[in-house]
Amino acid sequence: MKATTIIVAAAFLAASFAQAGEPPALFGDKDACMEGPVAQFGRYIGDWKIDDESLAQDGSGWGPGTGARWIFSCVSHGIAVQDFWMPNAGGFGTNLRTYNPDTETWEIVWTAARLNGLMHISAKQNDEGNIVMDILKPVQDPPRRIIFFEPDENGWNWVMQMSFDAGASWTDVYRIKATPWED
């Protein structure tokens, strides 16, 4: 509900600016997302080429995916980080990531083509500097989590894990390697 309220409020704000004749600066100003806690996701801002692979369902090995393009942007002076997921095989998805200073966590909503409704996600940076995302709703069976690893000059890695024992251990099932997009 809170995520839906944020999206509706953002749309209302944009419409208000449009009626006033002043276009809002919704994207850009990368520096606004590079300070304080917002920099946790701000450090991923850019245009990324995605190489991916999935674990075979029988666990016998890894197979290549079709790849994607993933663009992260700073929203309106650092109020959020939004990304746009564009798989090479078609489709589209987007996350809106806002930092809640009261809980020191990220509140994230995800929506994509062929997804009914919104996915609600909570995330927190761990002691190693990685961001661990837990999918809250809809409830996942088996449970899933996603980890963004710290970027370096060559890009960054990401992994989706599933737990087959109620969170006692986690198994990598999908991996991403992000490198700068080159036209």
Image: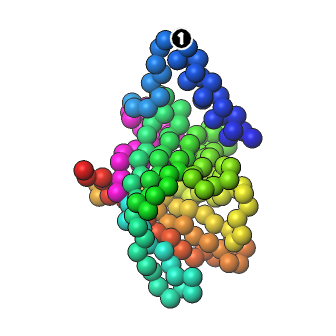
Q: Residue at x 47, y 85 (%)?
A: 61
Residue type, mark 1 in image: Ala
Nearest the viewer among 36 and 38 is 38
The residue identified by callout 1 is: 20
Q: Position of residue 93 (x, y in %)?
A: 53, 51
**Residue 159 in view, yes or no:** yes
Q: Residue at x 39, y 64 (%)?
A: 67
In the rendered image of this protein, does residue 74 appear above or below residue 48? above
Position in image of residue 81 (x %, y %) = 50, 40
Residue 8 in the image: state x and y as whole percent.
66, 31
In this view, the residue farthest toward the top is 20
| Residue 66: in magenta span | no
Instruction: Identify the residue at horizontal 68%, vertical 49% (top origin).
Output: 117
**Residue for point 75% across, 41% down:** 1
| Magenta-colored span | 30-49
Query: Helix, strand, or loop for circle 1?
Result: helix
Left or right of residue 69, residue 11 in this image: right
Specify whether residue 47 is painted magenta: yes
Q: Residue furthest left?
A: 183
Q: Is residue 157 above or below residue 80?
A: below
Residue 45: x %, y % from top left: 40, 44
- Pointer 1: residues within 10 angstroms few (<14), some, or many (20+)? few
Q: Considering depth in this image, is 69 or 175 the residue closer to the camera?
A: 69
The residue closer to the viewer here, 155 or 92, is 92
* Camera sees residue 43: no
- Quadrant hosting residue 99: top right
User: Nearest the camera: 25 or 127?
Assistant: 25
